Amino acid sequence: MSVASPYPKAVPEANRYIGQRSRKLKGDQFLTGKTEYVNDLELLGTVHMSVLRSPHPHARIRNVDLSRVRQDPRCISALDGEEAKQHADPIPHFISAAVFGGKYNDVRVIATGKVTYRGQIVAAVVAPSRGDADALLDLIDVDYEVLPFVLDGDEALEPGAPLLYDTEGWEDNVVIRIPFVEGDFDAAAAGADHTLEDTFYHHRYSTQPIETRGYIASWDPRAEAYTLHFATQNPHPLRWVLSAALRVSEAQIRIIAPTIGGGFGLKMPGHPEEGLTCVFSRILGKPVKWIEERDEALLLGAREHFHRFKVAFNADGKIVGLRNHFTANVGSISACPGWGMAFLAGLSFPTGYKIPATDVVVTAVTTNKAPWQAARGYGKEGPQIVMERIIDLVAEATGIDPAEVRRRNFINKDEFPYKTNSGLNIDSGDYHQALETALKLLDYDGFKAKQAAALAEGRHIGFGIAFELTPESADIPGTIVGGYDTSTVKMDPSGKVTLLTGVTTPGSGNDGGIAQIVADTLGVDLDGITVIQGDTDICPYGFGNYSGRSMVSGGNAALLAARDIRVKLSKVAAFMLEAAEDDLVFDQGKISVAGTDKAVAIKDVANVIYTLAFATAHMVEPPLEATRVYKPDNIVHFPDEKGRIQPYPTYSNAVHVAIVEVDTETGKVDLQRFGVLHDCGNMINPMFVEGQMHGAAVMGFGAALSEECKYNADGSLAADRFKTYMMQRANEIPMVEVEHQVTPSPFTLLGVKGAGEAGVGGAAGAIINAVNDAIRPTGARLRRTPASPIHVLAALKEAQ
Amino acid sequence: MSDTIHIELTINGAAKSADIDPRLLLVEAIRDTFGYKGTHIGCLTGDCGACTIELNGEIEKSCLVLAASADGGEIRTIEGIAPDDGGLHPVQQAFWDEYGFQCGYCLPGMLFAALDLIESNPTPDEAQIRHAISGNYCRCTGYNNIVTSIQTAAQRMAAAK
Amino acid sequence: MIKNRFQYLAPTSVEEAANLLAASPGDTEVIGGGTWVVVEMTAGDRDPRRVIDLKNAGLRYIREEKGAVVIGARATYTDVVRSAAAAKLPALVAMAAGVTGGGQLRNRATLGGSACYGNPSSDVPGLLVGLGATLTVRSAGGTRSIAAADFFTGPLRTALQTGELLESMTIPVPAGMKQGYYKFKLAESSWPICTGTALVGADGSATVTIGAANCRPVTVTGSASDLDGLARAAEAAITSPFSDTLADGEYRKQIAGAIAKRAVKAAV
Ligand SMILES: Cc1cc2nc3c(=O)[nH]c(=O)nc-3n(C[C@@H](O)[C@@H](O)[C@H](O)COP(=O)(O)OP(=O)(O)OC[C@H]3O[C@@H](n4cnc5c(N)ncnc54)[C@H](O)[C@@H]3O)c2cc1C
Ligand code: FES
Ligand code: FES
């Protein structure tokens, strides 16, 4: 693998950290139970919050009576929605649909007036222990006027459907309708050899890190400031959200995100409990703690799309037109960024395929389900699954091999950067090669014979392919979703390096990856670098963790900052060694003159810079500190002539392949092998990249096979614990076999692309295609996710 | 009804006692009463395994046990896995070397399940490893590197014998 | 943390346990392993004033007695897997080894607890009925025996009366018959959706008990050489299919025949 040299005289190849499988920073702390997560923090005088949630999916709140609870000696404080209004304004929406011409509704820390989903907060209490706080909820009396409700996205669009919001502008339940139309689909269809129409239902599922959300808010009445220990992916943006809601300046809020036990989008800002713990803390002057329970975490779903598509294609398998008008049931309105996934689902069609005429329209509709929250993949997984279904349907209709149909429709490697119909500017790739490698991984060519032999024994095995395009490192204009980030590199007088960055790690190891970049740039030992993330008072401004951005933005910013330090070290070292700067090599803690044995320790140079600022180090400006921002190329927010913007700098891609066996008596799918060819450009640490892909792919397995936010007819969440929201376990899946291809990004300094989101949609798509391949001889077709035994058996029965 | 109940335990070799609220789950007592925060809570329904400890020589999910019920018990937590010399246990070492965790939240369940397996089966194959850790969820790693870590640990431990 | 206070009791004999239970049965919960009841207390679904923990009541045993295996109510799935006596009942061992939740769960959860909980969507009820077990229950007044087929009376309902607790389960070793157990789950995390316990005689006669699919386990008889006939009988026997969040009864009924066949195959 070749890594573009990020500095003048590269650290000798053998000693480089970049490209190495360096171990996770502070791994021993994690392994011995010393790492502190939010729930582990004990602040003196902490009291505990519990929230009362609406038992109705849609109701007017007539009255909340807190008198009984307030009489109980365990009750330290209690609030209803009207009271909370005195303390907090509406929560600013992290990504407001109104910015894109959609509708807006106030979201408050406690509901006022109306509840629009079962589980919405209607009151909250604080007690000495969480157990007591939970017990107190039984003493709150709420009088509801129950209203008719709607759970289904299509039904919510029908005239006469219950209206969720009676505030201005809400004449129907449509949050936003966004067209992505290019070319003339009807003309393309009229001129094509064939057309086909079908539907696909992409169900609701969610993130579920093993650590739930957790917040400890403390208001210091003397300093008039908050210190918030919050398990959040985005400390700085959250500070902005809270300052607006809590009527304080951003300077009055310090957010310290401790180690996070997984995020995947769940821990992005906008949740009412964030502001609510702050409100109580301000009232009480004490730390207020709230840890989310699993059934609360399961309320927040993502993705529920109903796709109705029509494809126009020729006998040679070339697709000439795609129409897909789909609904996205985004649940109730929240201040969290979840709904935006619907936007990106539309924007991402038709992924990596060249289709001249596209007519894609997404309608985001609000219903009486709980809101969406951002989830890994952030909307792009829907198009991946559906496009790959479409390719297979075209293959079936034309009788052409599905791999070949992909080859015939892929963007060619010499066509990059390639502007898609929706305006995305895909940076680079070699999709054809990626496909070939992936197919070999699971011996595609040999599979047909195996399949026939199995079928002769009555066994149904299938092979599924899914290409995956993953736009990463987004910058969404007009929102607090930034595509750039900031890093600070400091070298102290003893030569030790501290790295502070605005990106955060939910466990992915980006702290280590960024440190690798800095270590190489400065020629220092990786273990000597201290990384600090997640503290708004200490770290430079940054957006935190989402959209596979840590290396692209934070990593490249650290590279720039480290280079600035290096320039100073280099000048002083050249003076000390009486050599030309061009001849200096930084390596293993030393700066030496190439081809000689003259060398000086980096720590000595650092010391000279601090202590001999007017002598040896006269030519540089102390201290050794640099803060730099990295704004990747390729993001274009000025609309083009068609009004389209280009919010992503990088586009990683992957080809997923899966082999399944379907038990046609029960509908159960056994995933037997799974492989993926992944191309995210240059890799700083392939082990971390692979780890991301392993985890994302297995989330995709869950999406394809078992995870489902099922609702009961009464509007309550049926899948409210891990017994019913079934994630994949180790003994039902095979290894995720990963291979890499490296097509560097031409638009980022290190040639890196985003990694971390890729995998969910691709894996799910490959499995759904494999299931369909396996059951094809029965005449059945699965038109939905998940391919759980119940849905697969239903499809099989329907074909009988 | 007395408000508290007296319990005595050993945790990682140290004798501990406390008068506890009978409502406490063992995981809560271990974390909050006795301060061993390395044992995590992920579900409180017995599904995730993040609260795993060893109780009287057997691995258990400590959210399924009342603290009162563990009275007299001998407990080992994740903090008690490493040898006293400050180094790591070979299983921990392998998890670090093989990147067997990301956020680390699931480690109590994964490490104890691995220890339990290797003790009874020093040369486990992939299927046996996958079965042994099936009581634990990991949302980050897709289990790949956990399986590899346990394989590596078993091999190294067998070689060291 | 469990939200309301309760008194914790750990009696040291089954008689003492029965007496304590008799004192105030209405507001008391019995804890076997606790994997159900503690979770439900944590979730606030159960709110007892008193808790009787059977851990010291001497009920953790498995022994052979007169051609039968007697399992104390507190014996865990792990105990079954490790027991020499239980090895006479391969279907029982297969069932115990196949309980999910990892070693951690099998080390704690008891067969007795599962029997008393009476959730149709579980392993123990179908297995006990399929192997013709008898349950011994105790109250302050003494003990009585109940055939497993009569014990499971419906979803989350058993023949246990107020003030009674389960003492042991006696499973006859079926001489000259092969045993098989097969469980179907939607995924590894799923409850059992349909189970089959089969006894196959030397003459090929087969008895299959289907668990988890019906509100009560159902038993059908036929011949191991006519699997399709057995399958049809099994499906037809599902007259009150059991539904829960994971799977509705219709699905369970649809697969019951296939599961019956697989249980017989597991035995042969
Ligand atoms: C992660 C996980 C995985 C699981 N997997 C499976 C599985 O694969 N298959 C399966 O069938 N089940 C499974 N279960 C359910 C499991 O909890 C039960 O099968 C278990 O055996 C219950 O036993 P227990 O001793 O823990 O019950 P407890 O919680 O102690 O008791 C259950 C009920 O029985 C009562 N009770 C207990 N003992 C007695 C007694 N002696 N007399 C009177 N009443 C009594 C209690 O009051 C309570 O109402 C799983 C549970 C978890 C948490
Ligand atoms: S917290 Fe105990 S198993 Fe999840
Ligand atoms: S490493 Fe995050 S849950 Fe396992």
Image: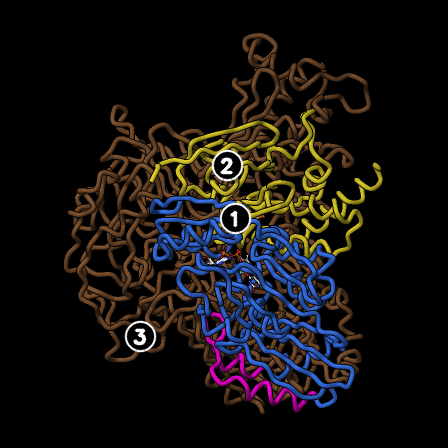
Chain colours: A brown, B yellow, C blue
Name the residue: 64% across, 88% down: A778
Q: Secondary structure at mark 1?
A: loop
Amino acid carrying label 1: it is Ser
Q: Work out whether B49 lies above or below A732.
A: above
Give the number of the mark in front: 1 or 3: 1
Numbered label attached to residue B30: 2
Q: Quadrant of residue B55?
A: top right
| Few, some or many residues within 10 Å of mark 2 (<14, 14–19, 20+) | many
Q: Is residue A315 visible?
A: no
Residue position for label 3:
A156
Name the residue: 51% across, 59% down: A377
Q: Secondary structure at mark 3?
A: helix
Answer with left or right where residue C65 lies relative to residue A536. Answer: right
Answer with left or right where residue A101 lies relative to residue B137. Answer: left
Amino acid carrying label 2: it is Ile
Cα distance in 3D space between marks 2 and 1: 28 Å
User: Residue farthest to the front?
Assistant: C141
The number of numbered discs placed on residues in the rendered structure image is: 3
Cα distance in 3D space between marks 3 and 2: 48 Å
Parent chain of label 3: A
Numbered label attached to residue C13: 1
The reply to the same-chain question for discs 3 and 2 is no
Answer with left or right where residue C29 lies relative to residue A583. Answer: left
Is C247 colored magenta in this rendering?
yes
Cα distance in 3D space between marks 1 and 3: 60 Å
Name the residue: 62% across, 33% down: B80
Parent chain of label 1: C
Is C96 colored magenta in this rendering?
no
Which residues are drawn in magenta?
A: C227-255
